[in-house]
Image (cartoon, rainbow, N blue to C red):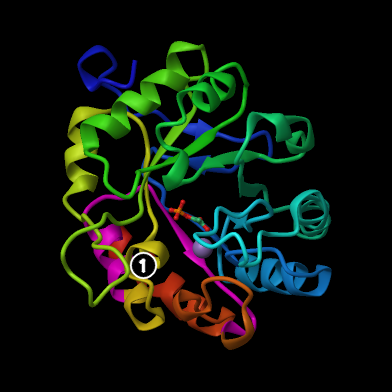
């Protein structure tokens, strides 16, 4: 179902609010790694909206390497995302870690499956029963073929609204958190009709690399970018080193739109 051979036209995903992903537009999804407070999420939501973001990201259930690290605000975080959505009109993108939490996700517009759950097949099958877009992130050490097969798990259950996300893969290089596989974008677009989103934040782990990688993604034909933006990166509870400020996001948005318009 994800294969372009049987579905030559690009899939365009349209949200109830009219926001589109795919079909010649560059969707900007921006917001903090994690929801931390009402003030923080609303402030970031309002500023990224002004800069042209059409979706708000923010983690409430966080897959952290250490069980002692901040695990997210969970249900309360989802409520704060809803408040920010009410205030700005921006649809919400947030990660699900367990199908058990699905009843809490009614107001979530796009459900993210994180890199660590890309092959959680039971979760993928449950999400396949929904009528809601799923942002599926490539696993830390998964091939493009495996990513497409995971999309297939969701689509086989009936939900064909899948967004594929290249978020960097594990390589021997240690200068960056992961290595952005930029060629994954044109490769996936050749193999599949599904929209491709690039996450330069988790790919690099470094704030000054976000803009050049975002520009590269726009240049190779990505349909969207998901970017971590925090009002006070040095005090962020998660992923501060890779978070950019609202001002930096504003300048990035202008540049990527210029690049996207010329390709
Ligand atoms: C995130 O988006 O905050 C996240 C945890 O991403 P990934 O699953 O790509 O590591
Ligand atoms: Mn993060």
Callout 1: SS: helix
Q: Quadrant of the C terminus?
A: bottom left
Residue beneath the point at 25% across and 12% down: 6
Q: Please, is residue 212 above or below residue 105 in the view?
A: below
**Residue 215 appears at what percent x and percent y?**
29, 68
**Residue 90 appears at what percent x and percent y?**
68, 53
**Residue 135 appears at what percent x and percent y?**
49, 40
Q: Is residue 244 visible?
A: yes
Mark 1 CB near ligand 1 (8 Å cut)? no
Residue 213 placement, left or right of 39: left
Q: Sort mark 1 into few (<14), some (14-19) or many (20+) by Cα contacts within 10 Å.
A: many
Q: Is residue 18 visible?
A: no
Q: In the rendered structure, does residue 28 fall within the stretch colored magenta?
A: no
Q: Quadrant of the N terminus?
A: top left
The residue to which callout 1 is attached is: 256
Q: How many marks?
A: 1
Residue beneath the point at 38% across and 72% down: 205
| Residue range highlighted in magenta | 212-233
Determine which quarter of the picture holds residue 66. bottom right
Q: Please, is residue 6 above or below residue 223 in the view?
A: above
Determine which quarter of the picture holds residue 151. top left
**Residue 55 appears at what percent x and percent y?**
60, 53
Query: Which one is nearer the viewer's eye here, 141 or 30?
Result: 141
Q: In the rendered structure, does residue 215 fall within the stretch colored magenta?
A: yes
Query: Which one is nearer the viewer's eye here, 122 or 85?
Result: 122
Residue beneath the point at 21% across and 55% down: 181
Determine which quarter of the picture holds residue 139. top left
Q: Please, is residue 137 above or below residue 120 in the view?
A: below
Residue 43 placement, left or right of 214: right
Residue beneath the point at 17% across and 69% down: 173
Residue 103 placement, left or right of 3: right
């Amino acid at each position: 179902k994800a294969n372009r051979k049987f579905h030559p036209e690009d899939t365009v995903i349209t949200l109830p609010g009219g926001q589109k992903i795919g079909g010649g537009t560059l969707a900007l999804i921006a917001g903090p790694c994690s929801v931390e407070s009402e003030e923080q999420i609303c402030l970031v939501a309002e500023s990224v909206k002004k800069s042209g973001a059409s979706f708000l990201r923010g983690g409430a259930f966080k897959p952290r390497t250490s069980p002692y690290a901040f695990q997210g605000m969970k249900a309360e975080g989802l409520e704060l995302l809803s408040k920010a959505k009410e205030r700005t009109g921006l649809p919400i993108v947030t990660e699900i870690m367990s199908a058990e939490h699905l009843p809490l996700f009614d107001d979530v517009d796009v459900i993210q499956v994180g890199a660590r759950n890309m092959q959680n097949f039971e979760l993928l099958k449950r999400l396949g029963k929904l009528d809601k877009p799923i942002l599926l992130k490539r696993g830390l050490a998964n091939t493009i073929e495996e990513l497409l097969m995971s999309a297939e798990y969701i689509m086989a259950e009936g939900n064909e609204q899948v967004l594929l996300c290249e978020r960097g893969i594990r390589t021997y290089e240690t200068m960056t958190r992961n290595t952005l596989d930029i060629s994954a974008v044109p490769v996936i677009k050749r193999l599949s009709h599904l929209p491709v989103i690039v996450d330069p934040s988790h790919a690099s782990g470094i704030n000054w690399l976000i803009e050049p990688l975002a520009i590269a993604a726009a240049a190779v034909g990505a349909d969207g970018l998901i970017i971590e933006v925090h009002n006070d990166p040095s005090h962020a509870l998660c992923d501060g080193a890779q978070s950019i400020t609202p001002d930096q996001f504003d300048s990035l948005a202008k540049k990527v739109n210029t690049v996207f318009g010329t390709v």
